[in-house]
Amino acid sequence: MTAELAERATERAVDAHVQIATADGGWTTVCGVAQLVPGRGVAALVDGEQVAVFLDRDGTVYAVGNLDPFSGAHVISRGLVGSRKGVPVVMSPMYKEAFDLRTGLCLDGDDQAVALPVHEVRVRETVAAEVV
């Protein structure tokens, strides 16, 4: 029983959240990291703009604009995540253009001048509860 109590005393409930920079220089929490599925995206609303958030298979979180510049549809969060020559990309589900998740640049053909906006993102761990 004593060992159990000592073990519980060191338990900590740690939760990690994804935060995106706001226009006023602050940060807004959009979701928990545990809610993200590696290789798939989610859409969030930050400062009235749709943002597509992705967790890469190596654990890196990216945030880019959710608006596909070619179709005009808010669908980038539904795109497939992968890599092209070592560059992490999301493929638009509409016309299949590849966008670099680090820079937002379109990597396909003559479309290199087109880019998604890239949002600054960070992961913050918080202690939700601590047993003492």
Image (tube, helix red, strand yellow):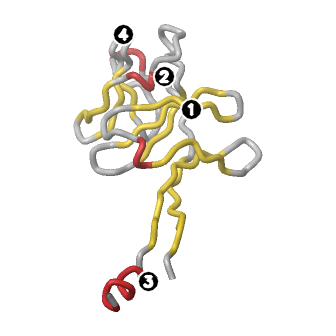
At mark 1, the secondary structure is strand
Q: Residues within 10 Å of mark 1 (few under 14, many from 20)?
A: many
Mark 2: secondary structure: loop
Contact (Cβ within 8 Å) of mark 1 with mark 2: no
- Closest to the observer: 21 or 125? 125
Mark 2 sits on what residue? 113
Describe residue 23's horizontal placement relative to residue 92 as left or right: right
* 44 displayed left or right of 103: right
Mark 4–mark 2 Cα distance, whole angstroms, equals: 16 Å
Name which residue type carries label 1: Ala
First in sequence, mark 4 or 2: give its number: 4
Name above or below for residue 54 compared with residue 126: above
Q: Which residue is mark 1?
A: 44
Q: Position of residue 79 (x, y in %)?
A: 37, 23
Pair 3/4: label in front: 3
* Residue that mark 3 sits on: 9
Q: Nearer the viewer, mark 3 or mark 2?
A: 3
Residue 1 to residue 73: above or below? below
Which amino acid type is marked by label 4? Tyr
Image point (27%, 33%), residue name: 82
Q: CA distance from mark 1 to mark 2?
A: 25 Å
Q: x%, y% of residue 56?
A: 33, 43
Between 42 and 111, the one lying in front of the other is 42
Q: Secondary structure at mark 3?
A: helix
Q: Which residue is mark 4?
A: 95
Q: Residue at x 53, y 59 (%)?
A: 124
Q: Answer few, some or many: residues within 10 Å of disc 4's Cα (few below 14, many 20 plus, some between 14 and 19).
A: few
Identified at 51% across, 27% down, the residue is 116
**Callout in the foreground (4, 1):** 1
